[in-house]
Each structure stands twice: as structure tokens, then as C-alpha cells.
Image (cartoon, grey):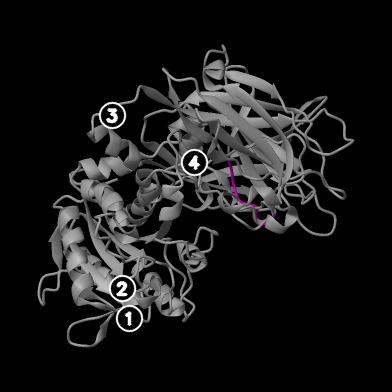
């Protein structure tokens, strides 16, 4: 959906805001950020927290300038302070280049729990220039300059008449600097349940040229006028370089963003400057209803330029080439309509796991009954995937083991059967795993491509039958991969299919290869032939993070699945079962 996504900094020229296909607000899953899949899991167990979904809009004034030749490039991070004092990350804004008075567009979503005291902590950072092409969720905060922090209680914001607080930033920033670190403003809004999305194609003609030696580099910023007459930015298009008649990728606005079709929106056209001092080309004020009318009547809106003598009408015009209202269904809309999730399991039987007869092995079967790393993963992960799998029958395979016929197999049936690879429930996986350990010798090399291809074949068959099914391959591994290129090729081939690959890492190995497969650096996987993956289908979860208490197994496993699922069904215009065609 073109201009409807965000995440990378890319020199500040990317689109920000609009509809986002993301289940949570952060790379770190948590109890406060909302995730349909996690919520559904807990609700099914009778856990119904009383909460409202809240979107927070952040802005700052008079930030400390840490850059020598330019201004700071600020990003805000929000945490929830837990009862034990630990900070749990909830979300991050985008990075705004060269600005000491940023108005961030990226919202942070949090669940307002009426019965709880929720202490929010905000940290503001100046992002180092080296990281301007890196998605914000992957930025290491220790590598950025700290600009200050502020704290408040969520209920404090919610009980204010305009639901806005302005907080003074404090902190130990640099020795000898002025302690005035500026202020941070936080505005809260309850989210709107409407599924209506307006997809709009904008272009402009005859824009004024603001550049001396080339043409302007225009982008649009769309803001909603709120009751206080202030303008809250909700969306920004990408920058079109060197063009006075630009055409942008579609902008997708939800009712959450525009309020109602009659709410006035301020649409500003700027000339992008790397200094951060973007020059206004012109502006116009239109509601969504008026934008729809412009499209239907094939009319254009002239920009105006504000001056002391009033608004000067410009020859530059805004044109709406296309206006379409869509229903954007949620993950739960699909699942509750009868769309099935089907899980498949593959277990690593390579020698890098260690001799199963020795206690140091990840596959060691303890006579006392204590679960080994793989058994723990199967039990903890199994509870979650069993809940979402409609028939609880899992194809279960092993890879990298020497089977009874003496050959090394990279996709053998875990239950040892010649025909039929399915086991029933978590107990079935555990029994098949224990049986395989007695009958299969650990070997190698470690190849994922065979089990990925096998899962892809199943997904492809289902697709050809138009079945309302989506498949998830769960790979439990120690993370030592022999054939990275072959694995990437298999994953890229599978990226067109209704399939996600969830890799669970056991042990304490360096999981760099698994993190590369996860493609959380914002760059989709590229095969050896140069083909780019249609979408990101991999999620990596290290069990050590779960056992250290950083994140719950439910949230870790389900963090990216709704987004991956939705990216597939939306790209193919697949509706929930029984829903009318959009």
C-alpha cells in the first residue's frame, strides 16, 4: 500500500503513518501494546482485562542539540515501568532529521487498564547518522545519544480535559551543559473500532520551485485539526525528488486517523531539505468527504501560501486521482470466520546439539524427568500453537539425523512411520521426539531447505484448492546452519505462499544467522538468483530471552504472526470466510 507504511529512516524521505500492518507497536512484544493474537489467546482462557486501546501522539520542544554541523535527529521510546522496577519497551516513534522541535507522526499504542497504575517512562535519543537507513525497531539505544527522559502515569493523561500533558525532560546528559533539556508533550486518544480505510492517490501540478539549481523535492504532510484547533500530523508521503508535478504512492487513512469524513484535514506540500528546514510550497484544508468529491468531479484544489497580508492563492494544485473506501479486516476477523491456522513442526537432530548421552547435550534425556532444552521448547511453544491449530494434528519432522537405514535425512517423519507424518497434540510431539532420539543418530549437515520446501509444498497444495488455510512451520534448532544460501532460496520461493516460518532457538549459541533470516533489518531476503522475497515470512525467537523473563512465550511467538498473515491475505484480496467481496 505504497505510502501507508513506516519504519526505516532512509535519510528522512520515506512515508510515515497511514495504515500499518503491524500487530504491535514495537519489536519487543509486551503486555501493554496490543496484539490481536495474544489477546484472543488470553480471552479464550477467561482472562478479560478491562481496558481501552489508546494511541499516544508525541511532540517535543527545545531539545538539546548534540550535533555539531546540524541539529539533533530525535526519536522517542516509551516504556512501561513494571512492579519490580524494570522497564518494558512499548514502542518507538520514527526518527525526525535535524529538528529540535519534532512532531512525531508514528503513534504508540498502549492498553489503558482502568484498575492499574501504569507508569510510563519516555526516553528521547539523538540517532547517529550512521543508522539513518536502519529500521527504528532494530536500533541499539546504547549507540545513540541520550537527550533526556520524562515520566507520568497514564491515568494522569486520560483524566486531563484535552488528554494532553507536557512533561519536562530531565537526565544526566553531558557534564557542563545547560540542564534545560526541553519538554515532551503526550496526547492520548481512544482508538476507533471502525474498519473503514480510505485509500487516496494524490498528485500535484505546477508547484512553485523552491530550489536554485534543480527542481523542488516535494512531499505531503496530512494533519487532523482537533478540538483545541491544533493540528496533529497523521501521515506523510514519501519524497519525490526533483519534480514539480509529483505523483505519490497511495495514502491509506483509517477513521482512527481522520476522525470523521467531515473533520478538516490540513494538507501541506513541502520541499524536502536534508537540513530539516523543509520549505512550505503551499497548503490547503480539505475533509475526507471533500477529497472524495474532488476525485468524483475531477476537480483540483489550489494551494495557498499564508502571509501577513492573507493567503495567497497559488497556481500549484492538488489532484485526487483515486479515492476508494475499503473494509480492512483484522486478524481476528479471519480466525473467527473459520480461516484455519495449521502448524507443522521440525526438530534439529544435528550433531552440534551434543551427544544425547551426556548431560551437556541439548538433547540429553534426564533420568530424573527434568526436561531438556528441546522438550521445554516443545511444551511451552506447543501450548500456544495447539490453541491456534484447529484439528491439533501436526505434521512433525526431524532433520539432520541418521535414520535406521543408515542415511542422513533432512526431513524424516518424527514418529518413525514410513507413511503418515502427523502426531496429535503436544503429547504426540513429545512422544515422537523421545522415540526418534532412541532410533535416530545425530548427524549433519544442518539444512533447513528440505523442511521449508516440504512445508511450502503443503501450503501450495492448499492454495490450489482455494482452502481458507494458513500454515506455520515451527523449526526448533540450536541455530548452527550449514547452508545459509540454500535456506534463503527456499524461504524466498515460499514467500508467495500462505506460510510463515517460526524459528525457535534453543541453547546459548550465537544466533546471528537466525537473526539474518528474520529480516528485521527491513531488507527482505534475496535469493542466489537475485529474487527478492515477496514478504517477510520468518520470525526468530530465542528461548533464552523467554527463560530470562524478558518476554512471555505467548507474546514472543505471536508477535509477528498476525502481521505476516495479514500481509498475505491483503496482498491477494482474500476476505474472511463468508465476508462480502471488497
Q: Residues within 10 Å of mark 1 (few under 14, many from 20)?
A: many
Kindly identify which residue carries mark 3.
Answer: 47
Question: Toward the viewer: 346 or 318?
Answer: 346
Alpha carbons under labels 3 and 1: distance apart = 45 Å
Kindly identify which residue carries mark 4.
Answer: 25
**Magenta extent:** 235-243
Kindly identify which residue carries mark 2.
Answer: 349
Mark 3 vs mark 1: in front: 1
Q: How many marks?
A: 4
Question: Residue 33: horizontal and vertical position, in percent?
Answer: 45, 36
Would you say the residues marked 3 and 2 are in contact, meaning their CB atoms lie under 8 Å apart? no
Q: Earlier in the sequence, mark 1 or mark 2?
A: 2
Examine the residues drawn in magenta and state their main secondary structure: loop
Q: Residues within 10 Å of mark 2 (few under 14, many from 20)?
A: many
Question: Residue 439: horizontal and vertical position, in percent?
Answer: 19, 76
Q: Is residue 34 visible?
A: yes
Disc 3 on helix, strand or loop?
loop
Amino acid at each position: 500500500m505504497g505510502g501507508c507504511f513506516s519504519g526505516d529512516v532512509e535519510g528522512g524521505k520515506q512515508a510515515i503513518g497511514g495504515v500499518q500492518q503491524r500487530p504491535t507497536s514495537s519489536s519487543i512484544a509486551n503486555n501493554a501494546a496490543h496484539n490481536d493474537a495474544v489477546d484472543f489467546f488470553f480471552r479464550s482462557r477467561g482472562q478479560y482485562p478491562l481496558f481501552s486501546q489508546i494511541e499516544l501522539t508525541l511532540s517535543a520542544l527545545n531539545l538539546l542539540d548534540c550535533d555539531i554541523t546540524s541539529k539533533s535527529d530525535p526519536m522517542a521510546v516509551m516504556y512501561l515501568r513494571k512492579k519490580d522496577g524494570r522497564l518494558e519497551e512499548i514502542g518507538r516513534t520514527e526518527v525526525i532529521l535535524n529538528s529540535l522541535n519534532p512532531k512525531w507522526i508514528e503513534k504508540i499504542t498502549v492498553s489503558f487498564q482502568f484498575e492499574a497504575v501504569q507508569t510510563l517512562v519516555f526516553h528521547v535519543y539523538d540517532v547517529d547518522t550512521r543508522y539513518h537507513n536502519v529500521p527504528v525497531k532494530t536500533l541499539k539505544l546504547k549507540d545513540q545519544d541520550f537527550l533526556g527522559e520524562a515520566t507520568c502515569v497514564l491515568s494522569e493523561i486520560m483524566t486531563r480535559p484535552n488528554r494532553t500533558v507536557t512533561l519536562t525532560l530531565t537526565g544526566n546528559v553531558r557534564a557542563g551543559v545547560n540542564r534545560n533539556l526541553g519538554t515532551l508533550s503526550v496526547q492520548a486518544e481512544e482508538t476507533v473500532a471502525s474498519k473503514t480505510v480510505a485509500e487516496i492517490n494524490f498528485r500535484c501540478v505546477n508547484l512553485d520551485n523552491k530550489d536554485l539549481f534543480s527542481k523542488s523535492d516535494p512531499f505531503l504532510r496530512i494533519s487532523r485539526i482537533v478540538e483545541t484547533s491544533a493540528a496533529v500530523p497523521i501521515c506523510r508521503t514519501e519524497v519525490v525528488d526533483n519534480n514539480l508535478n509529483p505523483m505519490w504512492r497511495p495514502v491509506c487513512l483509517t477513521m482512527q486517523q481522520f476522525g470523521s469524513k467531515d473533520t478538516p484535514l490540513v494538507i501541506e506540500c513541502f520541499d524536502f531539505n536534508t537540513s530539516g528546514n523543509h520549505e512550505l510550497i503551499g497548503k490547503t484544508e480539505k475533509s475526507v468527504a471533500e477529497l472524495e468529491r474532488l476525485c468524483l468531479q475531477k476537480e483540483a484544489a489550489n494551494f495557498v501560501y499564508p502571509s501577513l497580508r492573507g493567503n495567497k492563492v497559488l497556481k500549484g494544485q492538488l489532484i485526487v486521482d483515486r479515492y476508494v473506501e475499503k473494509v480492512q479486516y483484522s486478524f481476528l476477523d479471519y480466525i473467527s470466520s473459520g480461516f484455519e491456522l495449521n502448524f507443522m513442526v521440525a526438530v534439529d537432530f544435528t550433531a552440534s546439539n551434543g551427544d544425547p548421552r551426556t548431560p551437556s547435550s541439548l538433547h540429553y534425556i534426564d533420568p530424573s524427568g527434568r526436561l531438556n532444552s528441546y522438550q521445554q521448547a516443545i511444551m511451552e511453544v506447543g501450548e500456544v500453537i495447539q490453541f491456534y491449530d484447529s484439528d491439533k494434528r501436526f505434521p512433525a519432522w526431524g532433520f539432520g539425523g541418521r535414520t535406521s537405514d543408515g542415511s542422513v535425512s533432512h526431513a524424516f517423519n518424527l514418529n518413525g512411520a514410513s507413511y503418515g507424518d502427523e502426531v496429535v497434540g503436544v503429547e504426540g510431539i513429545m512422544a515422537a521426539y523421545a522415540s526418534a532420539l532412541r532410533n535416530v543418530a545425530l548427524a549433519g549437515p544442518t539444512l533447513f531447505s528440505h523442511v521449508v520446501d516440504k512445508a511450502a509444498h503443503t501450503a501450495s497444495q492448499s492454495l490450489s484448492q482455494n482452502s481458507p488455510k494458513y500454515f506455520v512451520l515451527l523449526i526448533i534448532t540450536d541455530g548452527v546452519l550449514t547452508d545459509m544460501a540454500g535456506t534463503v532460496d527456499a524461504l524466498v520461493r515460499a514467500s508467495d505462499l500462505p506460510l510463515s516460518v517460526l524459528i525457535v532457538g534453543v541453547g546459548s549459541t550465537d544466533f546471528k544467522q537466525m537473526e539474518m533470516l528474520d529480516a528485521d533489518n527491513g531488507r527482505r531476503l534475496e535469493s542466489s538468483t537475485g529474487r527478492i522475497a515477496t514478504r517477510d515470512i520468518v520470525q526468530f525467537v530465542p528461548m533464552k530471552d523467554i527463560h530470562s523473563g524478558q518476554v512471555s512465550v505467548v507474546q514472543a511467538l505471536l508477535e509477528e504472526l498476525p502481521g505476516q498473515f495479514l500481509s498475505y491475505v491483503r496482498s491477494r484480496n482474500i476476505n474472511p470466510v463468508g465476508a462480502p467481496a471488497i
